[in-house]
Structures are given as C-alpha cells and as structure tokens.
Amino acid sequence: MMHSTRKRRVMCKNVCYMSDADTGWEGDAMSKVRLTDRSVAALKPKDKRYDQSDSLRVGLRVRVSPSGMKTWVFEKRIRGGPLRSHTLGRFPVISLSEARDKAFTLEKEAMEGVDRKAETVGKQTVSSVLDTYEQLHLANLRTGTERRKQLNTALAKYLDQPISKLERRDLQAFIDKVASSGSLVHANRYKAALSAFAGFAWRRGYTEHNIGAGLSNALREKPRDRVLSLDEVRAIYDAAEFLSPLWKPCIRLLILTAQRRSDIAGLRFSEIDIEKKRFDLPATRTKSGRAHIVHLPDPALELVATLKTKDESKPSCDLLFSTTGKTPVSGFSKVKQQLDELLPDLEPWRFHDFRTAFATTMAETGASEGVVDRVLNHSASASAASAVARVYNHSKQLKQRAAVLDHWAALVTQDSADVVSIAS
C-alpha cells in the first residue's frame, strides 16, 4: 500500500510538474502558485488584464480582466506541432478542479499528437470567433464596446458563415465602400479594427492565413491644421443652448473642461467632488491609462449641480449623460450635424478641436506648456519627467491647472472678453 501510494505521487509529479518548455507556453513570465478555489476567488482586478498560473497543472492559468471576470485558459504545444490555446470557461462556473481535469485531458491529447483545433480550423462562424475575441481581448479595452459595434457592422454579411470563407478582398471591399462614401477617416478606423481581428483569428488558429495582412488604408492621414478661434468656440458654446436638455450640458462641459469626448460622455456622479470643484477620472477610464484630476470652473460646476438635482427618473444611474440609465450617451455625430445646421458659416470642425483651441488660446496667455499638457492629460512635452517630478507635477500643479481652466471658462462664456496674460 505504501509502495502504491508513493508510485502514484511520483507519477503525479512527473505529469503535473513540468517546465514551460514542456508546455510550450511562450507568454510573459509570471509567478506560479498552487491555486485553490479560495485564492482564485480572492484575485482582484487591476488596471490591465493579468494571468495567474497554476503550479500544479502547468500551462493552466486564470485570466483576470479589469472588469473582474475570471477565465480559465490552458496552453499546450502539440507534439511536433503548433502551440494551441484553449479557453476552458469562466470561474466560478468552472471550478478549479474542473479546469484542471479539462487541462489534463488536453495535455494528454497533445502528448499523443491530437490537435482538436486543427479539426475545427475555419469551421467556426465569424460571429462565434467575434464572441471569443470580445471575451479575451475587447472586454479589456476602454473602447471595447465601440470596437465590437464596428466589427459587427463591417462583417454583418458574414456573421453566420464559417470564418474560413472570409477573404481579404471581403474586408477590403467594405473599407473601400466606406471610403467611397466620403468617410475616409472612418474607413481607416474600420481597417484598423478588421486588421486586429483578423490577426487574432489567425494567431488563435481559427484561420490558416492572416487575411488582414496587407489591407490598405483609405487615405494617408496627416496632422490637422484646423484650430478653432476663440470666437468660433464661443459660437458653438452659445449654439448648444438650442440642443436637448441632455446634450446642452454635455457639449458645454466638453468645451469648458477641454477633456476628451469619451471622458465627458462617461462621466459619473461618483467621480465628482462638488466641494473640491473637480472630478477624478480613474486610470481605467482615460486614454493615457493615467488617473486624472480635472478642475471644474464655475460655469461647469453649475452645469453639474443642475444635473445632480434634475434627473430623478433614474435614481440608480451613476452616469451624468445617459438615455438608458446603463450606458453612456452616444450619438455625437447627430449632435454635430445639429450644430452645423445652427452654424452654417463655420468652417469644418470636430469636437476634438476644442482641445486644440484650448491649448492654443492658453499658450497665447503665457500659460505654462507643462500645465496645459497636464490639463489635457498629456505627458509633459518638454522632457521626460523623473519619478519625483511626476509626483510633484501631479500633486503641486493643481492650483495652476485650476487657474488655467478658470481663465479659459471666463473667455468662453465672455465673463472676460480679452485674452490677457496669466503667466506668473
């Protein structure tokens, strides 16, 4: 009996404790611990997706997304063949012991040269591969929902077809169709989305070739020279008066704070501190991946205060701007069209131009370039700051940033009609 027990332990050791070279795993180095259901449940989400490997079943790991979703993943190199990645399900629906059992079965098959995915390459529908792409990649992106909508639109004709029937010319035909309508920049955005998805499908073994390689852009984009003048910004700000009760404060807050459209559209009441006259964006909500503090000038503060007391029909909704009570407002293109109709003599412009107008006008007042950059949540452009300088700039320039935004708001609302120097 003692001999039998010892033999089983040796066999378990030989099977379970293998090197990364044995598993064929080629990802980033990560620590391995002997996972338990309790330790997996205790894993906390971070700003970026991360994996925690299991030391008992090498190649098995739990993937934790920023949203807190936990997915079992197992990777193993087929004997004499390619590396295969398998998604085993979500925790806690799939327990640790179930994930280990599934991984053991896949490991045994791989050692025998059995390649499950080789039998199904190209047979899955475009829609099912898109679902996997969303689960493993898009769910971890701030713009993941928007990207999925893009792909659904671009691939609408092929969603129920096997992905093996999808060809590069199909993707290029859609890009060219969008470009021919005059939306050249949108065509480029679709090209980027389709290229990324096609690369994912190929790397994961859903297609034999990367059909996204070699797709052409609709145009070669150049930096925009358009800068809205202060008078033009004032005209747009005034025209917002005629927008709906939802869009008027949204557009005006976009102008007064000079922040990105997605940051304002997704603004939450829980991020706002009325007493400190500011809102705090977490790193997961910003394009730069850095937490960001934004001062609220008095006109902006009045808009927020009005919103806080106005919409009591959605008491559980934390979003300032929402029509569903669950997701941020969308439809900026329609609002832009309304503003263009109200301002027919205005040269073509974009919402993003508010940020350029802010930076240009503030530079004319003599405001520090570093302060302006930090208002916009850019890195300081003069030089790369040291770790100590970054902390200093984050904590000690809030007053300067507030002063710049206060002056900008006064100029826009014409409480101050002149562009005067604010340099200290």
Image (spheres, helix red, strand yellow):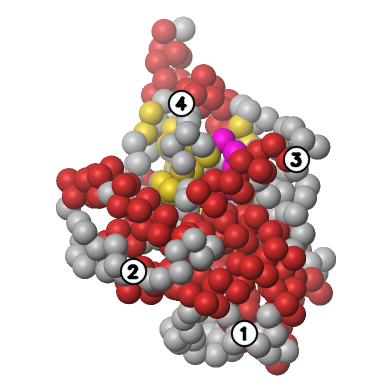
Mark 3 vs mark 4: give the one in front: 3
Q: Residue tagged by mark 3?
A: 311
Q: Magenta span covers which residues? A: 267-271
Q: Nearer the viewer, mark 4 or mark 1?
A: 1
Which of the pair 153/246 is nearer the observer? 246
Tell me residue 134's x, y (percent): 64, 55
User: Viewer-nearest of labels 1 and 2?
Assistant: 2
User: What's the residue at 56%, 27% (across, down)?
Assistant: 96
Q: CA distance from mark 3 to mark 4?
A: 47 Å
**Among numbered discs 1 and 2, the one appearing first in the sequence:** 1
How crowded pointer 2 is (Cα within 10 Å; few <14, some 14-19, many 20+) is rated as few
Distance CA(mark 3)–CA(mark 1): 33 Å
- x and y percentages locating residue 217 in the rendered image: 56, 86
Query: Which residue is under mark 4?
Result: 35
Spatial CA span between label 4 and label 1: 62 Å
> Which numbered disc flags the more N-terminal residue, 3 or 4?
4
Q: What is the three-letter code of the residue carrying label 2? A: Val
Q: Which residue is mark 1?
A: 346
The residue that mark 2 highlights is: 420
Q: Type of residue at label 4?
A: Leu
* For the residues bearing labels 4 and 2, Cβ distance under 8 angstroms: no
Q: Secondary structure at mark 1?
A: loop
Specify which label sits upstream in the sequence, 4 or 2: 4
